Image (cartoon, rainbow, N blue to C red):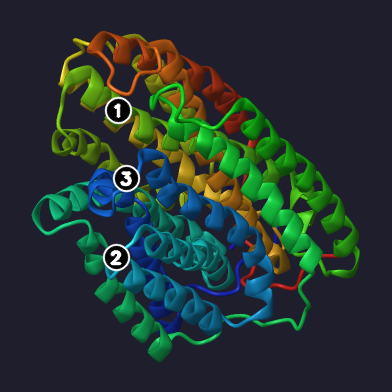
Amino acid sequence: MAATQTDSIRLPAPAQEGLTRDQNRVVWLLLIAAFVAILNETTMSIAIPDVMRDLGITAVAAQWLTTAFMLTMAVVIPITGFLLRRFTTRQVFIAAMTLFSAGTLVAFFSVGFEMLIAARVVQASGTAIMMPLLMTTLMTVVPPHQRGRMMGRVSIVISLAPAIGPTVSGFLVQTVGWHWNFGLVLPIALLSLAAGARWIRNLGETERTRIDVLSVVLSAFGFGGIVFGLSQIGGHGGEGPDSGPSPVTLGVSLGIGVVALLLFGWRQMRLQQTDAALLDLRVFRSLNFSLSVAQLGVMSLAFFGAITLLPLYLQDGHGLTPAETGLIVLPGSLAMGFSGPIIGRIYDRWGTRVLLIPGAFVVSGMLWMYAIFATADAPVWLLLSIQTVLSLGLAMSFTPLFTASLGSLEPRFYSYGSAVVSTIQQVAGAAGIAVLITVMSAIAGGSSSLAPQAAAEGTRGAFVIAAIVSLPLILGAFLIRKPADQPVGAPPAH
């Protein structure tokens, strides 16, 4: 049926009404696998103090447990566009879950820092593949008029896993030790791997293309250099004047990243003329995709920056325990996750603007509320309310942005579009954490143990920056449209 929304881009009508039993099973297996991977990613921060004591390492060394994971993600994600075109759904899933399970197993039995770092890198290699695989599969098999509600399920994965991860990690660390962060995840990962090997069949067609090694190298230096630089900026804020990298190191890292990215883009534009690009940049020829990805990047900056900054403020500015902090953040994350399917149905029925416009106003408004009310004596109920409303505003934005961005592309570009979306999220998240934590630390005085008043002042300053950055979201919400229904698997338009 042709879309009737006033904000829709006109495309042909859908050709099927729903998922087959096998397709539905594949989608749920991918959702579970992605949930486990993201859950694992969010448990490490709580465990780091205990890991430091147990392995006898410094805070600077321990930071590499997170930095190495982020770097690996940044290097692998841009390659997933090629992987998803070259190999079958089943092959990619088995490879991703095997890597993730192997890394988790090694981490569980780690007896030294080097062993744990290696395990985190292997884990991240599998994690990096899961979200692009999930997004590409959804775009391939789900009828366009049902994509919103399916992307709503993805929002549950994205928001619920980070919400419960730190809480579960804190409980495990206090009771049975940090190794069991991995011990809890391992059997679920192995079951997912076994179920996928048993039931997942290939969806879509593969292409016998060759990988361009130079593109891989440029991508690694480009995205890796930028994410490394940003993670170092954000990672050492508040650790003391001698704990962070020198300005020269940061400048070199970011400089190499920018230059390598420019060369990477030039290389892709040449290769895409023969359909041989590692990451086909023709996805940006769609204005709606480009606008949606830019909007998603700003939203990710606000989301990841806020969920990193808020716990620091609550603990340093209000003296709350990690468990109490988790309980304050949890309601918003739960609301964000469980509202996803409802928001998806609204998107399917009414399009983007009914969600994006109020969502943008809510997100920007709540960031300004934090900038005003994040004081040392702010009532906890007010902070909880702001965080919950902010989470709902983000939920109103993420689902339509995921769906509208990829839905604006020709089917042959779904895998590349998924890789771009995941890469933008990774880089924007690193930037959000780096900028907000650095601003907070600079205003508060740069000490590792902040007085409540200093922590509050630093937090308000950081949220002022986030609120200013969020203002373009309001304009973007009026510009992004819902692609009208297009047949699943339709041949690309010429």
Residue 407 appears anywhere in the view: no
Task: Residue under label 3, please give it.
Answer: 45
What residue sits 35% from the left and 84% below the top? 195
Q: Is residue 86 left or right of residue 478?
A: right
Which residue position holds label 2?
A: 111
Q: Amino acid at mark 2?
A: Val
In this rendering, is residue 92 above or below 475? below
Dot 2 or dot 1, earlier in sequence: 2
Instruction: Residue at 55%, 75% (x, y): give it.
Output: 16
Point out the tag, 2 or 3, that comes first from the N-terminus. 3
Name the residue carrying label 1: 312
Q: Nearer the viewer, mark 2 or mark 3?
A: 2
Q: Residue at x 37, y 55 (%)?
A: 41
Where, by quadrant of the figure, is residue 144 drawn? Answer: bottom right
Residue 268 at what x, y percent from top left?
82, 57
Residues at marks 3 and 1 touching, judged by CB atoms closer than 8 Å: no
**Residue at far bottom of view:** 198
Q: Residue at x 36, y 39 (%)?
A: 59
